[in-house]
Amino acid sequence: MAAADLTTHPGHLARRLQQAHYLLWNAMVSEEITSPQFAVLNTLVAEPGLDQRTVGERVGLDRSTIAEVISRLSRRGLLDKVRDPQDGRRSLLHLTDEGERTHRRLTVRTARMNQVFLAPLTADERTVFFDLIRRVADAAEGLRNPDEPQVTPR
Amino acid sequence: MAAADLTTHPGHLARRLQQAHYLLWNAMVSEEITSPQFAVLNTLVAEPGLDQRTVGERVGLDRSTIAEVISRLSRRGLLDKVRDPQDGRRSLLHLTDEGERTHRRLTVRTARMNQVFLAPLTADERTVFFDLIRRVADAAEGLRNPDEPQVTPR
DNA sequence: CGGAAATACTCAGTGCCCTGATTAATCTGG
DNA sequence: CCAGATTAATCAGGGCACTGAGTATTTCCG
């Protein structure tokens, strides 16, 4: 009795949206490099030499997950990992030439995939789509870190 | 050079949204039962006796994942799994009393959590939020099964 | 009837995602 | 200066998500 309607549950919709994206990514972008892996490459293109924890923060991955993703990228020779001589706890990350080439190649394909993914929406709707999701995600993340100012600097 | 802006990548936003939901679920609903597990319980409340594959279809999980989720729920005594005497390939699923109690208890908490999760949006915005996500997810799923009629019967 | 095709499920393998505990290095205050 | 707190990374463990291959059962058709 009284089963809930999952189509009005944001968590269920978020999961379905992510799954749909996963499948399209595999079909249109790459079967080797995943979307989170691309996010890491993209961050290191913008800010080479970041440490592991900060990269995780940029792309929204916790310490354990970012360690796994980086270890896979490193194993495939897409990035280098060296101990910070100034602070022996940190590992500093830099893309290899191969890593930069891969990023460049996938950037083009990712843009194409996003076009297909968002095709059902008009330009105005896409703006709203981004805005609504961002607001919900940001607010929920804010609940986790009550110490941070409500508008995160940066 | 030329790093992409991930805040305009729907896949990245979808992942962040799901992670935010995961954390809130853990904090406000249950640390034992996950959101996909609740979705399975919910489906079996509405339609007892479904087979495994159909449940997976209802909640959007592939054959392997639904098998794992069901095995966990079964191990915890929340559902029973019996071979269909009419068709020896199928396993038919029914909630136990404990499973129904758990579903009832979590339904209340889930509703509360959704309120908190969607708090940043007005009532109108929530409607748009659901509509946009559903349209994008449905369209992407449609790309996978080109044989299905564009408006799925049911 | 009987073999080929389809179907439901399982298994192995890869990757993402989190928490809690541990280890190593740095920083801080008395 | 040095003991305790903090921080970066690792490790163990549980769960979600997919693909490809394999098994058992049923169905379809000649």
Image: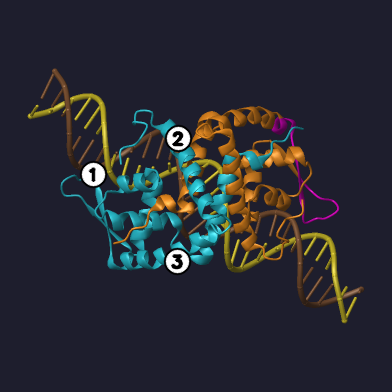
Chain colours: A cyan, B orange, C brown, D yellow
Instruction: Please give the residue where the numbered disc 2 appears in the rendered image.
Output: A139
Image position of A86 (left or right of B7): left
Q: Position of residue B26 (x, y in %)?
A: 52, 33
Which residue corresponds to the image point at 37% horizontal and 57% vertical from the top-left?
B4
Instruction: Please give the residue where the numbered disc 1 appears in the rendered image.
Output: A89
Q: Secondary structure at mark 2?
A: helix
Q: Nearer the viewer, residue B29 or A140?
A: A140
Which residue corresponds to the image point at 63% horizontal and 30% vertical from the top-left?
B106
Q: Nearer the viewer, mark 1 or mark 3?
A: 3
Mark 3 vs mark 2: tell me if same chain. Answer: yes
Disc 1 to disc 2, how far (Cα)? 32 Å
Q: Earlier in the sequence, mark 1 or mark 2?
A: 1
Under mark 2, the amino acid is Ala
Mark 1 vs mark 2: tell me if same chain. Answer: yes
Disc 3 to disc 2, how far (Cα)? 31 Å
Q: Position of residue B35 (x, y in %)?
A: 59, 39
Instruction: Please give the residue where the numbered disc 3 appears in the rendered image.
Output: A109
Q: Secondary structure at mark 1?
A: loop
Residues rendered magenta in the picture: B82-100
Q: Position of residue A101 (x, y in %)?
A: 33, 68
Q: Earlier in the sequence, mark 1 or mark 3?
A: 1
- Label 1: few (<14), some (14–19) or many (≥20) C-alpha neighbours in 10 Å: few
Q: Earlier in the sequence, mark 3 or mark 2?
A: 3
